[in-house]
Image (cartoon, grey):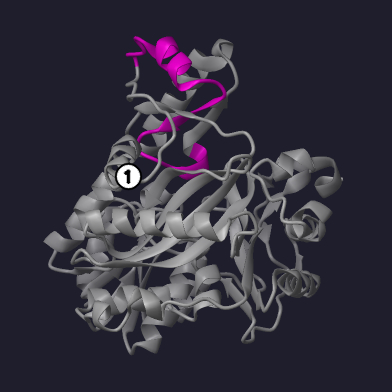
Amino acid sequence: MQTLLIANRGEIACRVMRAAKALGLRTVAVYSQADAEAQHVALADAAVLIGGAKPAESYLRVPAILDAARDSGADAVHPGYGFLAESSSFAKAVHDAGLIWVGPAPKSMEDMGDKERARLLAKAAGVPILPGSARFAPGDLDGLEEAAEEVGYPLLVKASAGGGGIGMRLVNGAGDLRKTVEATQGMAERSFGDGTVFLERYVRNARHVEMQVFGFGDGHAVHCFERECSIQRRFQKLIEESPSPGLTEAARAAMAQACVALAKQERYRSAGTIEFVLDDDTGQFYFLEMNTRIQVEHPVTEMITGLDLVQMQLRLAAGEHLGATLSQDSVRRSGHAIEVRICAENPAKMFLPSPGRITRLVLPEPGPDVRVDTGVREGDAVTPYYDSMIAKLIVHAPTREAAIARMLAALDGTVIEGITTNVAFLRRVIDHAAFRAGRTLTGFVETHKAELIG
């Protein structure tokens, strides 16, 4: 591996480039017409225009990306997160083009990308799963009401092909079931090309806890501890931390054992994240899904372990035998880390995206315990075509209380003008009495909306 093409944009493209350059690799950026002046383009050793502003015209165009790899002399491709990162067909196309794919085997991506199939594989590995139904295809809803009664209300309608928050809808009773299923099927068909959905029991007093795993592709794997991601809006994460304030040591050990068992069963290769819903009333955890890519919140794990997960991905893909040096006993954690996602959005208007030009940008000074990951600079335009996240702040401290104080100081040192952001909202969350007390359930934002938004 000598030249790495990053098939992504923004913050994650810049993050992957830093890791690649630290390993002495040449980097190639791809960009849309809207991103011609973007930071990831400026940081790369070479850059290739791949199409128009919309994702379907650029970052989702597999032939254009493969042509860019060939024309730039790239011999490897890292997908980042989002866009094509969990597309097994893209991974296969990269392999077929004679390039190195920095990520899991396509079969693992297929297994875990089908959310219903992933549930069955998790169950086979001994991982607890929530009650759920078989899948329902568009136009074929026979037995839907009976399946819902068996699963029990409240329940989630979930797109089989995934999609995180945008692929889920909550149903509280039978009266809303059919129209919600049909709406979710339509959304899934438009977004993922697969309109099938399934039903899954919804846990009201829940935490969203995930476990970072890293597999070596030979049946061996390690876990890198958990992250709690319960502070969300519209089922999409805003704040992540580790260790989880709601996980007992016994539950943590059981969750880690379950995750490693699943990764070993799949002969999983590269970085992956296994997500759980944790019932705060009972302490029982249940499998949600596995994401076969690097996560937005991976810096939280890096801050508490000292590992560089992206470098590990690159080294493994290049043929290095990481399993010889990275054992479970060697993965240790220290202190507490918190990450916040700074987004161009208006919390007072249901978190509506707020595109525009950044006229002033002041971010905290990075250091050993303060990290800033971003893909924008002062003067850059935030367009309406892509995800609204523009930066991440990550802090580390010996204790959770000290990490909260450090994050508040980091947010106080953040100034963004020209666009509306969620910085003030994030500060209110971090400083809220319930957050400080560790009462971080998935309904946190909705429960405390009046105090957080004003």
Residue in front for this viewpoint, 15 or 206: 206
Percent across and percent down for residue 341 are: 63, 60
Question: Looking at the image, can residue 74 be seen?
Answer: no
SS label for mark 1: helix
Mark count: 1
Question: Which quarter of the picture shows residue 132?
Answer: top left
Q: In this rendering, would 48 be left or right of 156?
A: left
Q: Amino acid at mark 1?
A: Ala
When the figure is inspected, residue 15 is found, relative to residue 390, above or below; the finding is below
Q: Quadrant of the C terminus?
A: top right
Q: Nearer the viewer, residue 276 or 338?
A: 276
Dot 1: few (<14), some (14–19), or many (≥20) neighbours within 10 Å? many
Evaluate whether residue 105 shows in this view.
yes
Q: Is 105 in the magenta?
A: no
Residue 5, image x, y percentages: 31, 72
| Image coordinates for residue 26, horizontal then vertical, percent | 32, 84
Quarter of the image holding residue 249? bottom right
- Say whether residue 28 is left or right of residue 210: left
Q: Position of residue 158 (x, y in %)?
A: 44, 32
Q: Residue at x 75, y 70 (%)?
A: 401
- Residue occupied by mark 1: 122
- The residue drawn where x is 43% and y is 17% is 150
Place residue 394 in its image quadrant: bottom right
Q: Is residue 143 magenta?
A: yes
Q: Which residues are magenta?
A: 139-166
Q: Is residue 320 above or below residue 93?
A: below
In-image side of 266 versus 346 (left or right): left
Q: Residue at x 67, y 78 (%)?
A: 397
**Vertical side of 259 occupied by 332: above or below:** below
Image quadrant in which the N terminus is located: bottom left
Residue that extends furthest to the front in the rendered view of this protein: 250
